[in-house]
């Protein structure tokens, strides 16, 4: 307004309701928007603040693209006649009608049971409670399927926070040898929603994170993804001469075009064991507590657990804190006066932390989230 007043001789009425006042307000808004756009552009080249297209551009430097929505993955225990082959892609369904396809095939052994991973054909955070699976696509000799624990929830299109976390984990993706390079390679396999990599560089077997690892071997734990694709991803980044640890073994060939006859290798890793987590919430009893308080709390805790609230999700080998869920519950309203939240591996937990093994991926089931009014 001072600039306009000076330009017109210094005798303008500076009231904002005048034409010149309105013009000054508009010009101020335009300048402010321009400055905001510049600040957004400047922040966009910093991975700590980048969002949307600018974040995608940073990812392209590392040959990364934003992950599409991922599917819930659940371990199904298949029972039937020994020798029955369950092909990759075979469908099961849960009680809500969602269908799940086997991520890789398998043959039922003499014990009569076979554990396979199934991925939901509908992407996103679809809940798959324990005991909800049944056969959808019949296979001769296959009698039943069940899931002893809940599935590992999928996710919507990769969020800003998740994309940046993965970028940090995959910056070593162009190297060969370091554990970070193996992790980056495995996380890039379609359908893989989580992974953990460690190794034993000593000359004797060791136990770390609850897992026994042979001498001079690498250990990889994975959630989701095709077994052959995972094995190849490990092979491409593992240093020569290093052994493997894990209960899933797949034979893959080196894809290097220089070979006339490509050498084959037996690569071992683990599909992480889904491990139920139980959470007990205690809030103050009052007339303001709604009748559906438990349902609301279950939804809020599940969102925090899966990371759909914008925070970090529960991952392989993580140490889980009960305090992670305070904000989610408190945000439900003033009626949610928290007395205590506890967490543990069994119903009625009493602890405030829970440490997962590096072979375990935490899962949550609404039935495992309880509410007590005190």
Image (tube, rainbow, N blue to C red):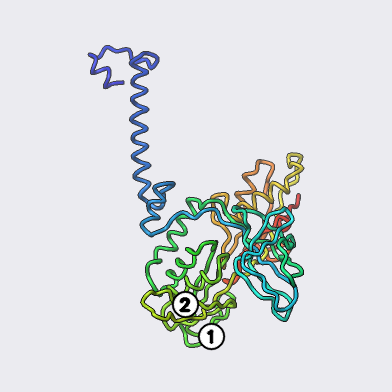
* Closer mark to the observer between disc 2 and disc 1: 2
**Quadrant of res 237:** bottom left
Secondary element under disc 2, as helix, strand or loop, is strand
Mark 2 crowd level (few <14, some 14–19, many ≥20, 10 Å Cα): some
Q: Quadrant of the N terminus?
A: top left
Q: Nearer the viewer, residue 78 or 34?
A: 78
Label 2 and label 1: CA atoms lie apart by: 27 Å
**Quadrant of res 136:** bottom right
Question: In the displayed structure, would residue 35 be above or below residue 49?
Answer: above
Question: In the displayed structure, would residue 60 be above or below residue 189?
Answer: above
Question: In the displayed structure, would residue 19 be above or below residue 273?
Answer: above
Q: Position of residue 364 (x, y in %)?
A: 66, 59
Residue reaching furthest bottom? 203
Q: Identify the residue under disc 1.
A: 205
Q: Position of residue 47 (x, y in %)?
A: 39, 53
Question: In the displayed structure, would residue 215 be above or below residue 346?
Answer: below
Side (left or right) of 20 relative to 346: left
Q: Identify the residue under disc 2.
A: 253
Name the residue at 65% across, 41% down: 333
Side (left or right) of 319 relative to 75: left
Secondary element under disc 1, as helix, strand or loop, is loop
Q: Nearer the viewer, residue 326 or 168?
A: 168
Side (left or right) of 279 relative to 68: right
């Amino acid at each position: 307004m001072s600039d306009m007043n000076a330009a017109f001789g210094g005798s303008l009425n500076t009231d904002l309701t005048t034409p010149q006042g309105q013009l000054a307000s508009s010009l101020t808004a335009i300048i402010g928007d321009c400055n905001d756009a510049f600040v957004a552009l400047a922040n966009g080249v910093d991975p700590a603040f980048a969002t949307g297209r600018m974040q995608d551009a940073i990812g392209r430097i590392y040959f990364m693209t934003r992950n599409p929505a991922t599917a819930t993955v659940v371990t199904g225990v298949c029972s039937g006649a020994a020798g029955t082959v369950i092909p990759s892609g075979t469908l099961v369904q849960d009680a809500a009608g969602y269908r799940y396809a086997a991520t890789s095939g398998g043959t039922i052994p003499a014990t009569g049971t076979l554990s396979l991973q199934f991925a939901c054909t509908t992407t996103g955070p679809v809940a798959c409670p324990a005991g909800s699976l049944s056969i959808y696509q019949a296979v001769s000799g296959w009698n039943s399927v069940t899931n002893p624990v809940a599935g590992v929830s999928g996710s919507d299109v990769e969020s800003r926070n998740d994309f940046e976390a993965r970028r940090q984990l995959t910056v070593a993706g162009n190297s060969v040898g370091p554990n970070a390079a193996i992790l980056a390679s495995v996380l890039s396999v379609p359908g893989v929603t989580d992974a953990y990599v460690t190794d034993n560089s000593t000359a004797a077997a060791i136990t770390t994170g609850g897992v026994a690892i042979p001498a001079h071997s690498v250990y990889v734990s994975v959630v989701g993804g095709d077994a052959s694709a995972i094995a190849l991803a490990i092979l491409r980044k593992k240093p020569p001469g290093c052994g493997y640890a894990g209960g899933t073994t797949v034979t893959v060939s080196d894809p290097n075009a220089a070979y006339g006859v490509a050498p084959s290798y037996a690569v071992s890793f683990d599909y992480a064991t889904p491990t139920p987590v139980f959470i007990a919430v205690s809030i103050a009893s009052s007339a303001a507590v709604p009748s559906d308080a438990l349902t609301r709390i279950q939804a809020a805790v599940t969102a925090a657990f899966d990371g759909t609230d914008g925070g970090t999700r529960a991952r392989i080998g993580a140490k889980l804190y009960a305090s992670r869920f305070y904000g989610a519950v408190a945000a439900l309203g003033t009626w949610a006066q928290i007395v205590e939240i506890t967490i543990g591996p069994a119903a009625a937990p009493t602890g405030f932390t829970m440490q997962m093994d590096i072979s375990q991926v935490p899962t949550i089931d609404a039935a495992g989230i309880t509410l007590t009014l005190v």
